[in-house]
Image (cartoon, helix red, strand yellow):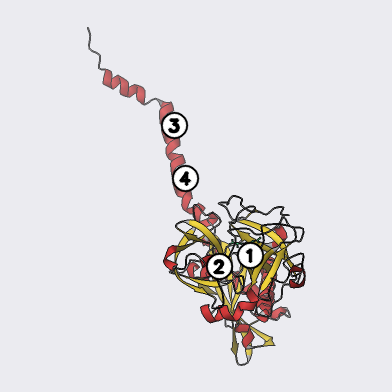
Amino acid sequence: MMHQPSASGRRKSSLKPWMIAIIIAAVVVGLAIITSLPVYFLVFDQKFHYYLTSFQIPSIEYSPDFSVEYSKNRTDLKQKISNQIDEIFQRSNLNRHYIKSHAFNFRSSNNDLKTDVLLKFQFAPNKADTVKRQADDILHQKLKLNESFLKIDTPLPYLRDMNEAKAEHILHSYCGLGRELPSMERIADGSVAKKADWPWQASLQVDGVHFCGASLISEEWLLTAAHCFDNYKNPKLWMASFGTTLSPPLMRREVQSIIIHENYAAHKHDDDIAAVKLSTPVIFSDEVHRVCLPDATFEALPESKVFVTGWGALKANGHFPNTLREVKVEIISNDICNRVSVYGGAVSSGMICAGFLRGKLDACEGDSGGPLVIARDRNIWYLIGIVSWGIDCGKENKPGVYTKVTRYRDWIKSKTNI
Ligand code: ARG
């Protein structure tokens, strides 16, 4: 048999022109991808950028009220400032890059009112210098020409960079930012809550079992009902969980201390309020942050639309859901709630009723301690009630009864300094 030099024959056949063409094409495509990646990130990878600026408001005199976090003056002025800045940037060529503004500090300088405002933009890194310069120009021009109530008092450049962590902390320290009211759909027997709609809602648990709801009022304080602790008073037994699902929880914290109202008597309904301190503060985010507390003088009028949320039973003796639920109810006056056919005088001035006399929509077992909230300014929510008691759930003439938060505003301040 004749021996053939097969190796060289094979090598010859592996270098066919069409194969070389494929290899070249692959190399070209590969190089193109590698070289265009940085360009892609530079142009299309939009990032958030934060700037700090200050304005003078000569038309308004400084009053200490502007430094009181929940005062009506402060809330109204903050909204007015945001509206003005929204309008300026939304009508400019930066409208695609502008996200929002947030006035977070008010102070007096030579008897004038001054405010510090955080601006949030989104754009690709290659635009950083241009956008900042344009934003500076736009503010400068609009506030100079317009008869705006905002005046710029800082020398150019007006905008100072702020790092993301610090800026987001300021933005999230904003209380009560939850569900946007206009997008609200009709709710029948209550419905599942969306993420970030009620971010102050917490679950208080013993041995991983949900017992009560609670509301975040700061990074480390929760407000709940005193009766949640009728059986277990030791803070070490308790855990707080956050996020819309009980399992898995988004975040968990141990409880450091429980402060029960001094006048609360177990198995009675009066002064059903407690403050719970967490061992370590939560980290505020879109899905976890605090609700606003109304002034002591705030009155929720009868028939106001309010929301109650919780992981309580879906009906008396019914099963407990894993995902947070919400239900829209109405404030019922104490006069009506104390009618003989309703609670016949059991509703004291430290309580507030919400629900419907025709029944059906209500909180239930396991919702206790949870929030009853009302919206002000579209999507800023205030805690007005704490789920406390009721006869049965959703029964005719037996609406839910809540601890009236405004009645305990000073107590809350004295215990938590909030
Ligand atoms: N006491 C109940 C609890 O511990 C809450 C009752 C609320 N009832 C009602 N019908 N709104 O969870």
Above or below, 345 against 36 in this view is: below
Q: Mark 1 near mark 3, Cβ–Cβ under 8 Å?
A: no
Above or below, 23 against 367 in this view is: above
Q: Is residue 275 left or right of residue 346?
A: left
- Ligand 1 contact, mark 1 (Cβ < 8 Å): yes
Above or below, 334 against 203 in this view is: below
The residue under label 1 is 389
Real-space Cα separation, disc 4 to disc 1, in angstroms: 64 Å
The amino acid type, in three-letter code, at marker 2 is His
The residue under label 3 is 22
- The circle drawn on residue 380 is none
**Disc count in the image?**
4
Check disc 2: other Cα within 10 Å, few if <14, some if 14-19, many if 20+. many
Q: Mark 1 near mark 2, Cβ–Cβ under 8 Å?
A: yes
Q: Ligand 1 appears in which quadrant?
A: bottom right
User: Residue 258: x and y, percent?
Assistant: 48, 71
The residue under label 4 is 33
Real-space Cα separation, disc 3 to disc 4, in angstroms: 16 Å
The amino acid type, in three-letter code, at marker 4 is Ile
- For marks 1 and 2 on the same chain, the one whose residue lies earlier in the sequence: 2
- The circle drawn on residue 227 is 2
Is residue 396 or residue 355 the one in the foreground? 396
In the rendered image, the residue lying farthest to the bottom is 110
Tag 2 secondary structure: helix
Tag 3 secondary structure: helix
